[in-house]
Amino acid sequence: MKKLIKLISFMLALMLVFAFAGCDLTPSNFLEVKAEDMIELPTSEWNNGSADWPWFPIVLKHIDKEVTFECSLDEGYFLLRDFSKPLLSEMSEKECDEFIVQNGVEIPEGFSGSFVKNVIQSVEKNPYWNLVVSWDVPYIFSNKIKAVVNDYYGARHSKNAIAKPGDTIYWEHYDGTPNNYIYKGFIAKAFVDIVLKKDDSIIGYAVVEINQNGGANTYGAKISALVIFPKIGGEYQNVTEKYVKAAIKKIKEKIMAESKTTAKTTLETYAQDKGKENYTAEDWAFIEKLVANGKTAVNSAADMDGVVTAVLKTKKAIDAVSASDMIIFLASDWSSGSIYIEGRTWTGFPIMFKYAKENTVFECSIDKGNFVLNGTQYVKTVVAQSGDIIEWWPYEVGSSTRIERVLIDVVIKTDNQTVRNTVVEIYSAYHSIRGVYVFNARLLG
């Protein structure tokens, strides 16, 4: 009997070993506990014009000072600076003058002392600071001081940052360096992935979700996940990077799926609010097709920028449906910079096609510039259907010379039979209020 009991116990032990072998991605394999108070978001709404926070702040906290936070992100950049060096702003005015002279900057007459120190203090607080003045001498001089100060602190951008408890990391939507930065446009959503480590052990992870809040430069954030892996039997669990990456990916995929569902509901509601009774049967069917196309674009979007762009384009298309034309121009006074003015909507000059009969196509061709497909493909010919939107880009691929006028030949066919031939002219004109050249369009026949 004892031998039988020993045999059964041995078999059970073997079953347990095989059951857990190689299962490092099974959530139940690790003990996870939701954590609090390790990540602080000091501001509920951030704007890059804010005096309090020039960049979006994320404060990292932990009672164990030996813990490290390995941070990475997908959109935007971390601003990194080395403040372990002595602060320049703590020097006297004379020492500030000597510092910039030693770094090759000549001080113009009348701008030594307090001017230099005030610029240094301003750049320490905000590396993008600029002196707003119409006089060239102080403007150029202050920019030279800014470059020296930023170089001293090693101001730079990175997709990755390693922080210690008590550190604040800063997110922003710029690229390049503070001395030569590039505005990245609108970022609808960004994720900051954070992995907590102690020595060689992974002891937790977090996901911070950053969202654009209405205005172009206004953002808010929330903690979408904050988990720790507690010790078991006095030892840290053997959590793998593969497991943590999979867990973080799953969280972000869920957030994106929810965002896409919300976006599609937004399109449905937007169309319904227009009122079916305010349109002909043909026009309402056309709106329903635009909504369906918009939903498809939302589902296909690779990121939140793509989702927002699809929604904005569809809304503008719906707004234009009251027009009786077969070819509808969705923008006026468009310029290549208006992608920012209009809120990331149009990469090129937008044209929408509308026709009630099924099996109708619009064959479009140009000899100058390019049609832009999906924001990445540049072509000379396009075959569009009713409800489609094409965008014309006023440049040849690889050229910086802007094309001032183009004629688009459009052949409208139903069941392979030509219904109509027409020509669209897109032309450039000076906009006296905006002070730039803009594009408009008209039908020539």
Image (spheres, helix red, strand yellow):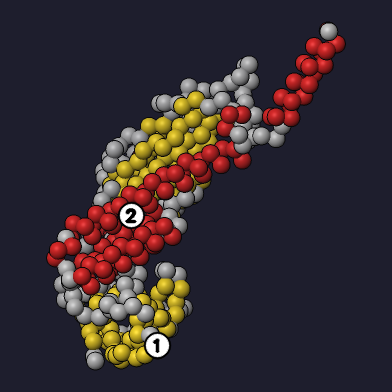
Query: Which residue occupies 36% across, 50% down?
Result: 261
As drawn, the label of residue 264 is 2
Placement of 385 over or under 164, stated as above or below: below
Confirm whether residue 436 shows in the render.
Answer: no
Element on which disc 1 rests: loop
* In this rendering, position of residue 300 left or right of residue 10: left
Q: Is 275 left or right of 342, judged from the image as shown? A: left
Relative height, residue 149 to residue 345 (above, below)? above
Residue 3 appearing in the image: yes
Quadrant of the rendered image containing residue 166? top left
* In front of the other: 426 or 404: 426
Furthest residue in direction left, as rendered? 278
Which mark is nearer the camera, 2 or 1?
1
Quadrant housing residue 371: bottom left
In this view, the residue in front, 86 or 366, is 366
Q: Amino acid at mark 2?
A: Lys
User: Measured from the top left, where is residue 188 in percent x and y?
Assistant: 35, 53
| Res 416 label | 1
Q: Residues within 10 Å of mark 2 (few under 14, many from 20)?
A: many
**Residues at marks 2 and 1, CA–CA distance in whole angstroms:** 33 Å
Q: Residue at x 56, y 37 (%)?
A: 244
Residue 426 in picture, x, y percent from top left: 28, 84
